[in-house]
Image (cartoon, grey):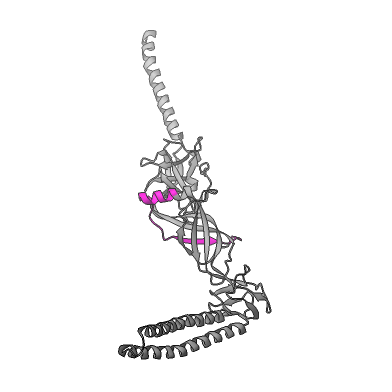
Amino acid sequence: MTPEMLKRLSFPALAGAALLALTACEKKQEQAAPPPQQVGYVVLHTQTVPLRAELAGRTSAYRVSDVRPQVAGIIQKRLFEEGAMVQAGQLLYQIDPAPYEAAYEQAQGTLANAEANLISLKSKAERYGELVKVEGVSKQDYDDARAAYQQGEATIIADKAAVKAAKVNLDYTRITAPISGRIGRSSITEGALVTADQTTALATITQLDPIYVDITQSSIEMTSLKRRLVSGGLGKADAQVTLKLEDGTAYATPGTLKFAEVSVDQESGAVTLRAMFPNPQEMLLPGMYVRTMVEQGVMSDAILAPQQGVSRNPKSEPIALVVTADNKVEQRPLTVDRTVGDKWLVTNGLKDGDRLIVEGSLKVKAGQTVTPVEVNLSAKAAPASGVPTGGAPTSGNGK
């Protein structure tokens, strides 16, 4: 074999050897390539969520009534214990009735005298009526007799009114409770002189069951809420209200929202809402500061996203990563409304059936193929309360 023939044979052999080596290398690289990153996801579903607002409020009495005298006199007796429960109509104070009894009896005597006199006047008018027909008396005398009788009738009416007024004043010597409730301290004692026009109340009665809670809400928030209700974005709620006491404990019995003021406070820009709560144990006292949870609407197609599945981009905009049908990562911009328990209420960006990444989101990026594994977060979930508790989505979960 000549050198030229050897040269011709060596090139294909070398090329084949090189091709075999390259193929082996590629197979080795394919065998060494890592598998797709595993991520944990939850499937999102629409659900009905009651939306509640946590608002500050103060308690106020259902009824408050000052006990005041309506006639003047000396207090003979105080007939209640300070701080006790009293019933409407219960006798509280007794004013000396003697002068009013005398006035009442005098009025009755005046009435009796007028009634007796009226009998005589009536008889005279009737007699003159017969005599004037036969010209036994002049027409003038008859007219005078009739006028005297009519004046007697008018006197009777006036005297009856005087008797009634005297009886009313006599009854006013018994000072009774205008409403049922708990009575406070007495401002006077036995022997004190009271008058009908005095400025100081004798005592104050407060009805505590039920009790009002006056709540303040921003007019901007209320306007937004009404707009969503009108547009159909929210359904109407039952207007139920719950509250927490000053020490943070929950009040056992829920209340109901009664009405909202029709004007906005010019200084605070807030609207006052009034709720009413049963208060049989009188645990709530007027003037207490409380935190209320007001149910303001119902969202029937809400998407609640676990907080670990929502993060923020460099522009501080909320985003989420979802797994597409071909197991690729897709980044979605979100619009979030509030937190509901441990989840975000998402109003735009996620839909029913989306697979939201909640574990391993820091290890993947948009467009990357992943191995999705469904996880169960129900054991960690808090009850959905619909309360806007604030805060912002943080960086994604890197587990």
Q: Position of residue 252 (x, y in %)?
A: 53, 66
Can residue 291 be seen? yes
Q: Which segment is the magenta one? A: 223-248
Tally the numbered discs.
0
Depth order, front residue of 336/93 = 93
Q: Position of residue 147 (x, y in %)?
A: 40, 82
Tell me the quadrant of the picture where the N terminus can be found: top left
Q: Position of residue 396 (x, y in %)?
A: 50, 42
Is 61 on the left-hand or right-hand side of 78? left
Depth order, front residue of 243/363 = 243
Q: What residue lies at 42% left-to-right and 28% top-to-bottom?
A: 26
Can residue 304 be seen? no
Residue 28's quadrant in the figure?
A: top left
Q: What residue lies at 58% left-to-right and 64% top-to-bottom?
A: 286
Depth order, front residue of 337/325 = 337
Is 247 on the left-hand or right-hand side of 238? right
Q: Position of residue 346 (x, y in %)?
A: 43, 46
Name above or below for residue 6 compared with residue 293: above
Name above or below for residue 5 compared with residue 20: above
Residue 282 among magenta residues: no
Residue 229 among magenta residues: yes
